Image (cartoon, rainbow, N blue to C red):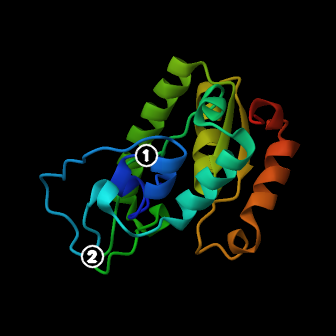
Amino acid sequence: MNPGPWGMCQTGVPFGDVYSCREFLNIEGPMKTPKLPQHPKRPIEGFECKRKEVSGSRFWGYFQKICGHPENFFKHCFVLNHCPLAFMKESGKNIAPAEMSKEVRAPLTKACDQTLKQILDLLGTVFIVGVGKFAETRAKSIIKRHGLKIGVGSLMHPSPINPAANKGWDEVAEKALTNMGLMPYLKS
């Protein structure tokens, strides 16, 4: 749900680790900073950001390894955040959806679900891979509510706060994507 503070918050790219954006996705450029006040512990530096986004490094590093070139990945895939907005505590720590009050979470989730449904329709999506349980749950909810004929699978989130992701995320991703039958669409 939340963009990473050193990834998408900096580059605008989901899992957008600066290095991965430059070296694999071939994306780089000047960034305009938001006119709204920034969190003092999470400044927007764009591609000048020196911090590493571990989730993004794992995610795009794996797809670079199996796809070779971004064109091979994007031939059949796209990546988006269910909600592209960052929510942070005073400390700078991300606020997870479960930590939000229902009064905040419900209308936000509804708006993001509606947007995701529009994107799925626009792109003629046939399969969704939810990266993390939250994404998988939102996808399944939208599919059921609208009676869509779209498959849904799950990929463990590559976050460093997930102990299992720290023990070989590439292998877990490989097994999950193979079991979903998606590897032929990804291999270079």
Type of amino acid under label 1: Val
Indicate the position of residue 86 as horizontal and vertical percent values: 35, 58
Which residue has dot 1 on it? 13
User: Which residue occupies 79% across, 36% down?
Assistant: 182
Comparing 57 with 111, the one in front is 57
**Badge 2 local density, few (<14 within 10 Å), some, or many (20+)?**
few
Q: Secondary structure at mark 1?
A: loop
Q: Separation of disc 2 and disc 1 at Cα?
A: 20 Å
**87 relative to 187, above or below:** below
- Horizontal side of residue 145 vs 6, given as left or right: right
Image mark count: 2
Indicate the position of residue 80 as horizontal and vertical percent values: 50, 41
Give residue 61's quadrant in the image: bottom right
Indicate the position of residue 20 as horizontal and vertical percent values: 51, 52
Label whose residue precedes the other's in the sequence (2 or 1): 1
Comparing 89 with 5, the one in front is 5
User: Which residue occupies 50% across, 18% down?
Assistant: 122
In the image, which disc is placed on residue 31? Answer: none
Q: Specify whether residue 44 is in view.
A: yes
Which residue has dot 2 on it? 41
Type of amino acid under label 2: Lys
Give residue 164's quadrant in the image: bottom right
